[in-house]
Image (cartoon, grey):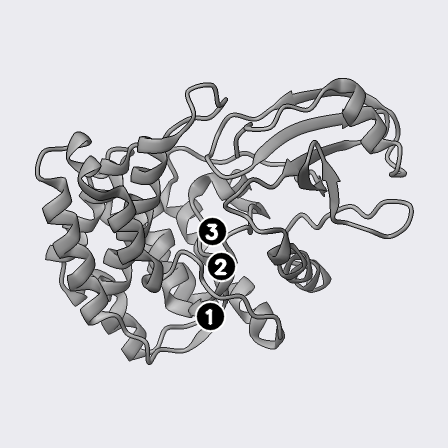
Amino acid sequence: MAVYTQVSAEALARFLSGFDVGDLVSAKGIAEGVENSNYLVDTTRSRFILTLYEKRVSAEDLPFFMALLDHLADRDLPVPPAVPDRNGRVIHELEGRPACLIQFLSGVSVSHPTPAQAQAAARAMGRMHRALTDFSGERPNSLGPAAWKPLFERCGRDLDAIAPGLYAAAGAAVDEVLARWPHELDRAAIHADLFPDNVLMLGDRVTGLIDFYFACTEVRAYDLAVMHGAWAFDAAGTRYAAEIGEALMTGYADSHGLTPAERKAMPVLAAGAAIRFFLTRAWDWLNTPADALVTRKDPLACWNRYRFYADAGETLFL
């Protein structure tokens, strides 16, 4: 989450007048994340998240995201569907951006998950995947393997400003992962970004799966690979927590299951997930506007994860 587009109190009050949610009490920009502009909104009746979708999220994709959230909510998954206005619409425009008012879910995102929390989160992902087996919507992965080489080329030799020699090393890494990518594995709708800050918890209980704006149709086990890299390392990506990695694999296997082929492919899937987030963070690091209220994320933390997975064997995921 982040704030790129400023919304005045007057504009927000007018926006809320179209909903049956009470009057505006307060609104605060949320600086975490890098994708959309987000505000925590309190009204006289409840609390909501206002999201304005920036350039990386296409307005054409919003019906897919909203349908996916409704599908999961109907199956009692802890997700935050959009709030309809008095005319039943959930997708709007505010300050020149597509916008949705989202239900607020209680809970906190853990910075240092315990094995029990990691296992519970992975179980929730498994339940989510089961609930999506009859979801008919499809969306190409706009940041999937086909996008990595073009994004690498857009970053270009500016990568060496992040770390000396990074351009050559990253180019070789992208080529290596793409050559080994397991296209033959089962595909499905996935979250594709289930980092700890997109899971809300109370103790060891998952109370919310949020921020589905990278959701897409992709190799299903890639979702677990993204989660593994996001949860099982320290912030710098230099220290791997084996007990967290094992808890993730156990939790997912218990609630959904993994085929032998999916387990065998996990090292390259995890390396690919690290490459994907390295490249998008590198682009943002090099191009984030100076006046944006946003917390930039260090691309080298994901590069360190890639180097770990590049050297890891299949036994890491057994």
Contact flag, marks 2 and 3 (Cβ < 8 Å): yes
Which badge, 1 or 3, is on the more N-terminal residue? 3
Q: CA distance from mark 1 to mark 2?
A: 8 Å
Observer-nearest residue: 23 or 122? 23
| Residue position for label 1 | 256
Q: Is residue 15 above or below residue 233?
A: above
Contact flag, marks 1 and 2 (Cβ < 8 Å): yes
Q: Amino acid at mark 2?
A: Met
Q: Secondary structure at mark 1?
A: loop
Q: Residue at x 28, y 63 (%)?
A: 269
Q: Residue at x 56, y 70 (%)?
A: 138
Q: Amino acid at mark 1?
A: His
Q: CA distance from mark 1 to mark 3?
A: 13 Å
Q: Which mark is residue 125?
A: 2
Q: Position of residue 302 (x, y in %)?
A: 26, 43
Observer-nearest residue: 114 or 182? 182
How many labels were placed on the picture? Answer: 3
Q: Is residue 307 above or below residue 300?
A: below
**Residue 300 found in image quarter:** top left
| Residue position for label 3 | 121
Q: Secondary structure at mark 2?
A: helix
Q: Is residue 297 visible?
A: no
The crowd level at tag 2 (other Cα within 10 Å; few <14, some 14-19, many 20+) is many
Q: Position of residue 221 (x, y in %)?
A: 38, 67
Q: Position of residue 36 (x, y in %)?
A: 55, 37
Which badge, 1 or 2, is on the more N-terminal residue? 2
